[in-house]
Image (cartoon, rainbow, N blue to C red):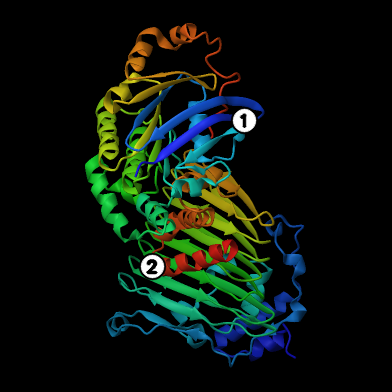
Amino acid sequence: MPGFTPDTAQTLGGHDWLVARRVAAAERLAAVTWPSTSEEIWRYSRIDDLDLERYQPRPADQRSLAVPVLDPGLVAKGVVVGDLADLDDPDTVDWFGTCSDASPDAFTLLHDAFVAGGAYVRVPPGVVVDEPLFFEHRVGGDGLASFPHTLLVVGEGAEVSVVDRFAAHGAPHLCDIVIELLVGDGARVRYVSVQEHGPETWQVGLQRAHVGRDASLHSSAVALGGDYARMRTESFLEGQGGESDLLAVYFGDSDQVLDFRTLQDHVAPHTRSDLLFKGAVEDQARSVYSGLVHLRESAQHARASQTNRNLVLTEGASAESIPNLEIEANDVHCSHASAVGPIDDDQRYYLETRGIAPDEAERLIVLGFFDDVLNRLPVPALAGALRRTIEHKVSRLRG
Amino acid sequence: MTTRLVIEGLHASVSGVEVLRGVDLEVASGEVHALMGPNGSGKSTLSHVVMGRDDYEVTAGSVTLDGTELLGLPTWRRAELGLFIAMQYPVAVPGVPVGVLLGAAVAGRGGDPGGVDAAVQREAARLEVPAEFLTRGVNDEFSGGEQKRMETLQLAVLEPRIALLDELDSGLDVDALRDLAQRVVALTRDSQLGVLAITHYARLLSELRPDRVHVLMSGRIVTSGGPELAQQLEQTGYEGLAAEFGVEELTVRPPEPADPFADPGF
């Protein structure tokens, strides 16, 4: 049985650069101290339950990425989409790992040691891609660990929308994701990740964006599946005037744990970031939101907001919400808000006075709660399907 | 068919304090009744007890609609049977626009929600509700006046048999007050709506022209009469009236609890 060893890292295929990176990471992995809940960043997580011995790396011959077909006009303009396993363009190979190397942890290292492919998009400067690009990461498999990766390199003034869907099924399965969003100066990127794992999937992931001068990132995360599903979402505003909007919708049921760690890291002046994470938990599910807004000394005139709201729909469910600010600049605007609570009795009563039965009232209130985030999804077609999924989760509980 | 809301010997407590101390009142289709009284006399409590809010404990009496006992029924069933309340402080429900709310309300009654949008549009035009208030969550960041227009719009679309209007006049300017009162009057005429209008002030009543005026003090109706009673109140005030009827306390002590519908400020 191949384990998480340098030998396995060697045999997973791909071009030389990828193999070399993997082997180097696998060698470093042996010296890594595995995290535990005693570290603040892993507090409230289920990291202590993880038993890596239960998994082995997914074999390289199982390709699982559905890559969108690109319009020939865009190909002519130099837009490239594909699987990272096929990537051998030295200009862009250099970008691989830029974001994860800037925010490493044990799981990005594990990812680096065994990543065999992933989604790759490159948009040259000035090129506008109108239609969203959909990537389907059908990772999974009993007793396997998969390492989905997305690398998005968007040139100066370019525009693109990308949707990743991750669905890993298998008993048990470990899914270790890295998403790298490189948003060039003046570029506009809309990114959506949808996580609909099976109930026995463990996910640990990093999504990190580096946002250039006057560039904008609009990112939405939808998290619905998994046994334990953790995602770190980071935006690094390194160019003056850059901005990021980070949104998330999550809904946990049965005994799921959904775990979010966010970082809005303002380096450059006149940068703006907004964050709105909204979630619901029912049954015995738990959610964790822990986020930091970091306004560095160099980030004068920056504006940042951070909002996390949680609906706790049953007594056995719970949500943690921990917003944090670290402000080193003296001329900035910053706000944060966080809320955890059950469905509001007054709202339910109001709807009941109109003749709406309590179950239906709660369904309307929960859908309404998510409405502002769903309406801001950059790909409106996703909102309808998501509303139905959320309705199903609510009515399953109430029915 | 005439519908009759009959309140008999109603006693209710909140946090162990009796706030309704034997209320008798009857409202029939097409009639307009005004319920007046000083702050803390139990007016809002009466409307929520009739509607079935579970913060109050009913200790005696009955409330029937066409002979059906309402006490013990959940709020939504009372609404289905034809009761409606326009709240003093309507509750914001983010992400639930009024059309969605009314569609669910109509579907819940076994009606066809297909006609709701057109009815909402029609009433919005009649009540001068701007389009943006139809797309936003109901009452979400609405001003007091906008909320009262939206309550009246819901009243007109749902066409209940009996409506409790809890200070429909608060937060309204004179023109808005007239518009909303005229809509209510038209409903009493065209749909035989029965109205119990709660108010401090005679101003609303000059528009609504009630058939009967009742004065509530310390959880009891101390007197009832025709429209002239409201005019008398304007002159004597509640204290003068209390002296006339030998009422020592105007309000229940302690007064009504902090309003659960007040904007929590977030």
Residue plotted at (61% across, 59% down): A281
Kind of residue sitting beneath label 2: Val
Left or right: A168 as drawn, with respect to A275: right
**Residue hosting label 2:** A379
Kind of residue sitting beneath label 1: Val
Above or below, B145 against A2 in this view is above
| In this rendering, the label closer to the viewer, 1 or 2 | 1
x then y, percent, for residue B6: 47, 35
Secondary element at image label 2: loop
Label 1 crowd (10 A; few <14 / some 14-19 / many >=20) = some
Of all chains, the one bearing label 2 is: A
x then y, percent, for residue B193: 33, 39
The image quarter containing residue B160 is: top left
Above or below, A391 against B200 in this view is below
**Residue hosting label 1:** B14
Q: Would residue B109 be seen by someone viewing this image from the given angle?
A: yes
Where is the N terminus of chain B found, in terms of image quarters?
A: top left
